[in-house]
Structure formats: structure tokens, C-alpha cells
Image: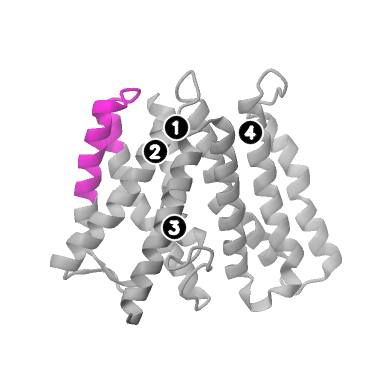
Amino acid sequence: MNEKNRTLMIRTLTALVFVPVVLLGLFWNTYSFSILFLLVLVACSKEYYDLIFANDYDSHFFRRNYGIFLSCFMYFVITMNNIFPDFVHFSIIDLPFAMLPLAFIAFIYELFKSSATPFRNIALVISGIIYIGVPMILLQFLAFDVTPEFNTKIIIGLIVMNWINDSGAYVVGSRIGKTPLFPRISPKKTWEGTLGGVFFCLITGYIFSLYYTMLSTVDWMVLGAITAIFGSLGDLIESMLKRSVDKKDSGNLLPGHGGMLDRFDAFIFLLPFAAAYIYFAK
């Protein structure tokens, strides 16, 4: 077996395991949903901090893990509030008051650590929370607050449209793509492929509107456009991150696919835009 076929086989086997696990977590119940995305949050955050602190991995042990802890703390509090509303009384307004004292520990740590770049370190820790932690928390809003009961249909729609966007852009780009989109970041991406992804996303959004009627056809079409545009930008931004530290993949957790962040980069980046649209359109 040549290397190309071996790589394809590994990618296929990984997908055959990965996709059912994601779908099971989405469809089973509130616990499987919350645990699934908590694990995604931890894995993606770890890979992100490993990348940005790659040049001095050991000395950034506290910063890396503290950033993961802060994101997980926010996610855990919101999750407990949604799953056990009769026992945990916590509003979204309370979150800043709980988070700020914890976040300011990063400043105190830098004071005693005597780092040459204290505020750069603080900014890098916070960037991981904004880039990965906050979007993952917005999944709780999409699942628990858009409809009266727990419902993951919107999230399923976003995930599927993101996959369709990626596949459609690849198929169209590989066949007729000629005009580079961002050659400095991703030489293989083309405008033709990107527009192909947008087209397939809009079609998929319309199909979802026929079955998942908690949102209107217009809403699903807008979400399709958001997925195509901001999902593609999210993929480019993660490529920019990897290029800045001279890495090919964010990790090796998924054989043949790279790291978890490589699989969820586009989905994570589109979430704030999708959630903001649904919040204001609701």
C-alpha cells in the first residue's frame, strides 16, 4: 500500500469513529451533549496554548493550564445552570462577577513571576478564552435558550452546513478553482471554491428549514451564509496561527486529520456570529 492510500485509509477510519461519537453526543441527552463539548473545549484549548507557547513550552505550564481552567470554569457554571435550574441559580449577568477575580489572578501571577513580557503572556491566556472558550459556551445558549426545551437541531444544522461548506469548497475548488483566495495563508484555497461552498451551504440551509421549523427559511439561509463566510475565515485564521509558529497541524489527536482544533476551527469561529444573529432575530 502506497503512502497516499495509507493516509486515506487512516483518515477514513478516524472519521468512522469520530463522526458517530459526535452525533451520539448531540442526540443522546443533555449530559452527553455537555460532556462532548467540554472535551472538545479542553482539547482545542490545549492545542491552542501549545501552539502559541510552543517556543517556551515548559515555562508556560501555569499560563497554558490556567487558560484552560478559566474556559472550563465558565462552561461548567453555565452548564450546571442549564441542566439543574432548580438547584443552581446563576444568571449570565453573574458570570463576570465570578470570572473577573479569577482572571485577575493571571496579573498577580505575572507580577511574582518576573517575566520579561508579562502583559503579552496575559493577553495570550485571555485570547484563548475569547477564541475558544466563549464560542463553546455559546453552544449552551443555542441548545437551551432558543427553544423552550433542550434542542440541538440548530447546532446540528451548523455542524452539517460547516461540513458541506468544507466539502463543497474542496470539490468546486479542485475542479475549477483558479483564483487564489489567500495565497499568503492557504495557497490551495480559491475564490471559486469558496463561492461553491457558499452555494452548497445556502442549499443545505433551505433543506434544514423544511424539517427544523423552529427557525424560518430566511433564518436558515442567513445561518448558511454565516457558516460559509465565517467558517471559511475561521479555517484561514487557524492556518495563520499554525504558520506563525511553523506547524502543519494543531495536534495529532485525530490520526490523518491532525488535531481537534483542525477539525473544529471553522465551527468555533462561526459560533459567535450565528449566536448573535439568532439572539437578535429571536
Determine the CA span between mark 2 and mark 3.
15 Å
Q: Which residue is mark 4?
A: 78
User: Is the residue marked by circle 1 packed among few (<14), some (14-19), or many (20+) residues within 10 Å?
Assistant: many
Mark carried by residue 156: 2
As helix, strand or loop, the secondary structure at mark 4 comes to helix
Which mark sits nearer the N-terminus, 3 or 4?
4
Q: Which residue is mark 1?
A: 152
Q: Residue furthest front?
A: 1
Residue 184 appears anywhere in the view: no
Cβ–Cβ below 8 Å for labels 2 and 1? yes
Query: Left of 71 or right of it: where is 66?
Result: right
Q: Residue furthest bottom?
A: 2
Helix, strand or loop at label 2? It is helix
- 140 up-or-down from 88: above or below: below
* Residue matched to label 3: 263
Instruction: Tell me how many marks there are.
Output: 4
For residue 225: magenta?
no
* The residue positioned farthest toward the right in the image shown: 112
